[in-house]
Amino acid sequence: MKYFHRTPVSPDMVIAEAARVFGARLTPAGEAPRRRAFAGSLGSVSVTSVPEGGHNTLVTVVTDQPGESEIDKLAKHFLGTLHVLAEPGHVLRGDY
């Protein structure tokens, strides 16, 4: 699955949040500027954060599993945590 998300959160903060969320359950599998990859028994996921025009960051999350798999749910949870970082009053909901 591939997800795209635009956020006012800085690219460096996106990568730090990815390390926090995915690093708790997966092993780091690759590192590059503004890109991290993680892998484990659930599958693999990569996160890329690129500054976009203005104050936005384009976040791309790619998993190697079909929708509604455990890694896919973790990826959606990560995108929800970015929303909370951007808007601290936002309440994260869902079964992710």
Image: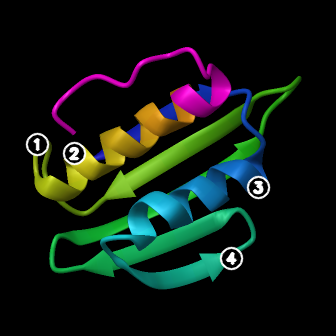
Q: CA distance from mark 4 to mark 1?
A: 28 Å
Q: CA distance from mark 2 to mark 4?
A: 24 Å
Dot label at residue 12:
3
- Within 10 angstroms of label 2, few (less than 14), some, or many (20 or more) residues? some
Give whichever of discs 1 and 2 has the lower sequence position.
1
- Residue 76: horizontal and vertical position, in percent? 32, 39
Amino acid beneath label 4 = Ala
Dot label at residue 73:
2
Q: For residue 91, what is the image quadrant?
A: top left
Circles 2 and 4 in contact, beta carbons < 8 Å:
no
Instruction: Between residue 90 and residue 42, name the one nearer to us.
Output: 90
67 horizontally vs 34: left or right: left
Give whichever of discs 3 and 2 has the lower sequence position.
3
The structure residue drawn at horizontal position 16% and vertical position 79%, both measured from the top left corner, is 41
59 horizontally vs 50: left or right: left
Which secondary structure lies at badge 4? strand
